[in-house]
Amino acid sequence: MFEILTVCTGNICRSPLAEHLLRAQLAPYSPVIASAGTRGLASAPMTDEAVQLAVDLGVPAEVAATHRSRFLLDAMLAQPDLILTMTRDHRREVAELAPARLRSTFTIREFARIASTMSDDELRAAAGEGGTDAAARVRAMGLGVAARRGLAMPPASPDEDDVIDPYRRSWQTYQLSASQLAPAIDQVVRAVALAATTSA
């Protein structure tokens, strides 16, 4: 069993959407997927717009409705094998709370950008450094992606590694946020599935 944590600001829009999508798409591997926010209300539900996006992307409405926000605490950062933030600011806040986890922490679009430059065989080889345990393999795969940070082509603009915050903004902004998040989720699922599968 492996663990993934997604992080945004209030834990009511982007990170819970990512959590639900990852849990659904990685369900065959029985992962532990959670989310948290760096600030905002405690125990708040997802916004109505975020729930609608989740439903539009295949998450049952009753599942999305169960979410309640929580604050990010340093104790939450010790266990996850992969930590995916929505922006560079969130990544920095994770690094401040748990400096030792920096190499396992990415903005979700940064992870997707780098992982997309790696072949399936390269991702499997990186995961192989973790042996046969799924959690160790996912963590090793993440370290392999981190090792490419200085080699992959940087984005045209640093903002391209962030997922825009739609909170209290228009439905069009929510849709833009989802359009940035969904392709990144696909790359995370690809990489994690390759890592969690011990046979080629």
Image (spheres, rainbow, N blue to C red):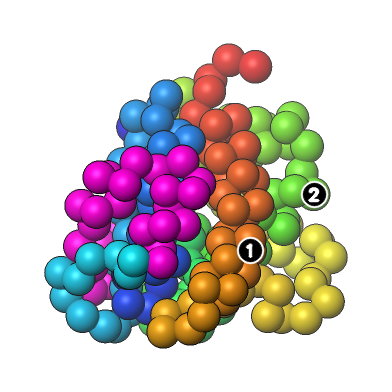
User: The residue under label 2 is which amino acid type?
Assistant: Thr
Image coordinates of residue 77 in percent, x first then y, are 31, 62
Q: Can see residue 160?
A: yes
Seen at 65% across and 17% down, the residue is 200
Of residues 37 and 152, which is closer to you in this image?
37
The quadrant holding residue 73 is: bottom left
Q: Position of residue 29 (x, y in %)?
A: 41, 27
Decide: is 6 above or below 90.
above
Verify whether residue 24 appears in magenta: no
Give the CA separation, mark 2 to mark 1. Answer: 18 Å
- Residue at (76, 67) in percent of width and height: 150
Q: Position of residue 5 (x, y in %)?
A: 37, 56
Residue drawn at x 31%, y 47% is 61
Q: Residue at x 23, y 66 (%)?
A: 45
First in sequence: mark 2 vs mark 1: 2
82 relative to 155 in the view: left or right: left
Does residue 160 sit above or below 26 in this rendering? below
- Give SS at disc 2: loop
Residue where numbered disc 1 is placed: 180
The residue segment tinted magenta is: 49-78
In the rendered image, which residue does mark 2 sit on? 117
Percent across and percent down for residue 100 are 41, 67
